[in-house]
Amino acid sequence: MKKVLITDGVHPLLIQGLKQAGYDCDYRPAVSLDEVRQIIGDYNGLIVNSKILVDPYLLDKAPGLRFVGRLGSGMEIIDRAYAAQKGVAVHNSPEGNCNAVAEQALGMLLVLANNLLRADAEVRQQIWEREKNRGFELEGRTVGIVGFGHTGSSFAQKLNGFSVRILAYDKYKSGYADQLDGVEETDMEQIFAEADIISFHLPLTEETRHLVDADFLAACKPGLVLINTSRGAVVRTQDLLKALENGHLRGACLDVFENEKPHTFTKMEQQLYQRLYSLDNVVLSPHIAGWTKESKEKLASILLERILKEEAARIVV
């Protein structure tokens, strides 16, 4: 019987669907990368989220592997070129959590704009400061969306009811704005010059790593609000922190970080992140923008459909 190793928490429908298709599912959400490397030779399929690096070393240890399924969108953890050489199909499900990411990006922005974190903390201490917590409205602002794939376009749809101007830039697409009302397809120069808010919806590649650095931030309008729900390493944290501390940035909403494992922080990282955490013009969350009950089911459903379709095509051939 064909065997699939599932290395992270998944919605039960994925396991049920694979079993119905004749797979023996080994559900091990707590398994480590080292353990996977030791046992992967016994499996024909592999389901991963973010902790398992599917590199040439692992692929070489998996002669019977037919497919890798990625729950979500980020493919930087999978060496797709080498997988193709080995005849291993690679699937992901970026549509599954794009709505969840877009909703959180908008939610974080509204929390920041209305000083809700500070106001909530003060009210709980019976501090009643209205003027100090006066916020700003989105209406009439210009929002730049960098990366106009599933999540970027979903974020634009959410913004449509807020009477904002939406500028979108995607280096590898054109004509994408025609499908959405109120979206202007543009370049980074116009976003730098006109955007009051910039939201990033990018994969992590060598091209996008530290895309947002000191030079990038200096080119932006003073008073910018930055939103990153994509990948932490798209933004150079130390440069972002300086721009927040010197007032060039009005605020930031961050769901992702360069290092998302606090127990591994170096002394320098401890100091860096503590400075970030001390600011009251940032809204932070632990990489949960796509982490909803609904998205868990959608991710599983889409991934299952793609795996079974590919496997059925192989049988026909």
Image (spheres, rainbow, N blue to C red):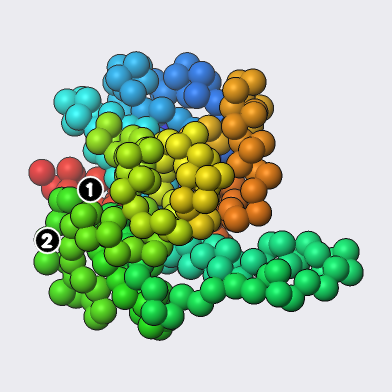
Q: Secondary structure at mark 1?
A: helix
What residue sits 17% from the left and 43% below the top? 314
Can the viewer see residue 266?
A: yes
For disc 1, the neighbor class at 10 Å (few under 14, some 14 to 19, many from 20) is some
Give how far across and how far down residue 192 sits, in percent. Answer: 29, 56
Which of the labelled discs sits on residue 174, or is there none?
2
Amino acid type at mark 2: Ser
Which quadrant does the N terminus fall into?
A: top left
Can the viewer see residue 25?
A: no
Q: Which of disc 1 and disc 2 is earlier in sequence?
A: 2
Give how far across and how far down residue 6 sits, in percent. Answer: 48, 38
Image depth: mark 2 or mark 1 in front: 2
What residue sits 21% from the left and 55% below the top? 189
What residue sits 30% from the left and 19% below the top? 56
Residue 126 placement: quadrant: bottom right
In this rendering, position of residue 175 left or right of residue 156: left
In this rendering, position of residue 204 left or right of residue 174: right
Which quadrant does the C terminus fall into?
A: top left
